Amino acid sequence: MKVLQVFKQFSKTFWIANLMELFERWAFYGFYVLFANYLTMSVDMGALGFTQSEKGIIMGVGTAILYLLPVFTGAIADKIGFRLTLFIAYVLYFIAFMIMPYCRSFISMFLNYLFLAVAAALFKPIISATVARTTDEETASIGFGIFYMMVNIGAFIGPLIALQFSSTAFYKVFYVSALLIVVNVLVLFFYKEPQREITSEPLGQSIIKILKNIFIALSDIKLVVFLIIVAGFWTMYYQLFFLLPVFITQWVDISTLSDKISDVAPWLIQMLGGTDGTLKAEHITNMDALFIIMFQLLVSSAVMKWKPVNTIITGIVISSIGMGLTLYTNNVFFIIAAIFIFGVGEMTGSPKITEYIGRIAPKDKVALYMGCSFLAVALGSFLAGIVSGPIYQRLTDKTALLKREFVERGIQIPDITQNELFAKACNDFQFTATELNDFLWDKYHPQNIWMVVVGVGLFAALAMWIYNQTLIKKES
């Protein structure tokens, strides 16, 4: 009953903001979950055929900039107003999505993804600030709970809808995202600007002040060390988008899962996989968002009374094991179970990171320290691009390993597409597609990438424990 009373206290602006968050996350994750495969799959499938290293640069650097810019875009929004900032973000979003199908070279795609990152960075701080300004001490907890629920619902349904269109043509995914942004422009007409403090201070001075404040915050060794360590967690987390979809597409036979579902619920496989009755890698990785929707409240309740640093360490260890297990095997059922383990770790540790930063911050600098948490995400996504880029290409990329096999056998590699290369290998080596996959798996052990990912996660957990035993307990 008390919850219902709280719901009645939320303003129209609060609900409009959450609706825009839902559509924006739907649009963003609709393309983002498919992005790694779009960048690297064969060109004769409508994809771009980039190398894994090129993919790592685009996604790693672009996503890092996306999380760096809100430090400054928040100041822009405070100066020109939330409503106008949202409109500019939507215009940039729409342009980026509409021209993305025409970006076929590395440099054009890289620049366009940076352009899209600017749009996302303009949008990102506005909705959370609106939720903060339309709630009070009594309603904030439930209000932000609703906000994060919208984030995860959008992150879950976005890829499901996008996959329906990608089965016929990748470019349709970008147009669907653009259409959802248009919907948000229409919703924006009902958005009322929340009260904000308006100052006469020039924008340039505001940005300079922000940089000075960040410098002050980063002079706190406790914060800097914590952010660097937590970047290890985000490095591992972003493999869910940068690396895992590619790994599953290249190495895992999903047809066994499709057949099982088809036997039990043929209507479900047709709804998810289309008329051809096949699932894609992104259906598997998207299970993480489903698990969060289902179990976040349960996990949060279970660890509610744990000390934040212990909870973070536990979450990093569990998610490290989970992500490592997803890459240890090419069995699709095992991978789904591993994604659940990873999700439990993510649900355990991730929410506590922000809470812990608030605890170590001086009382008059809590908001400043909270804003600096984006720096860890930016560093983590940049490092994730390295792991999923050149390191993955060296250890695990199926195309690179096949080319290595051709070189070992003294066979010249012609300038052909990836699919044509694999067809040539099957013909020259006298293998079926399955036999070629098993041969490369057994000879080159591409699953060894799991050691890199788990190593990053466990090193971060160990560093966090040392940090707590030395820097924190020493001062307390």
Image (cartoon, rainbow, N blue to C red):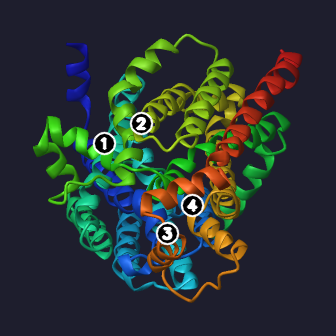
Q: Which residue is mark 2?
A: 336
* Dot 3 and dot 1 residues touching (CB under 8 Å): no
Q: Earlier in the sequence, mark 4 or mark 1?
A: 4
Q: Which residue is mark 3?
A: 430
In the image, 113 versus 192, the foreground residue is 113
- The type of residue carrying mark 4 is Thr
Instruction: Name the disc covering residue 333, or none.
Output: none
Q: Secondary structure at mark 4?
A: helix
Residue in the image at 71% along x and 63% along y = 208
Q: Earlier in the sequence, mark 4 or mark 2?
A: 4
Residue in the image at 65% along x and 81% along y = 411
In 3D space, how far apart are the residues under numbered discs 2 and 3 (Cα atoms)? 32 Å
- The type of residue carrying mark 2 is Ile
Q: Position of residue 90 (x, y in %)?
A: 35, 68
Q: Which-is-in-front pick, marks 4 and 1?
A: 1
Q: Earlier in the sequence, mark 4 or mark 3?
A: 4
Q: Which residue is mark 1?
A: 257
Q: Secondary structure at mark 2?
A: helix
In 3D space, how far apart are the residues under numbered discs 4 and 3 (Cα atoms)? 42 Å
In 3D space, how far apart are the residues under numbered discs 3 and 1 (Cα atoms)? 28 Å
Instruction: Name the disc covering residue 63, or none.
Output: 4
Q: Position of residue 200 (x, y in %)?
A: 56, 63
Residue in the image at 31% along x and 49% along y = 255
* Dot 1 and dot 2 residues touching (CB under 8 Å): yes
* Dot 4 and dot 3 residues touching (CB under 8 Å): no
Q: Earlier in the sequence, mark 2 or mark 3?
A: 2
Q: Earlier in the sequence, mark 1 or mark 2?
A: 1
Q: Which-is-in-front pick, marks 3 and 1?
A: 3
In the image, 134 versus 173, the foreground residue is 173
- The type of residue carrying mark 3 is Gln
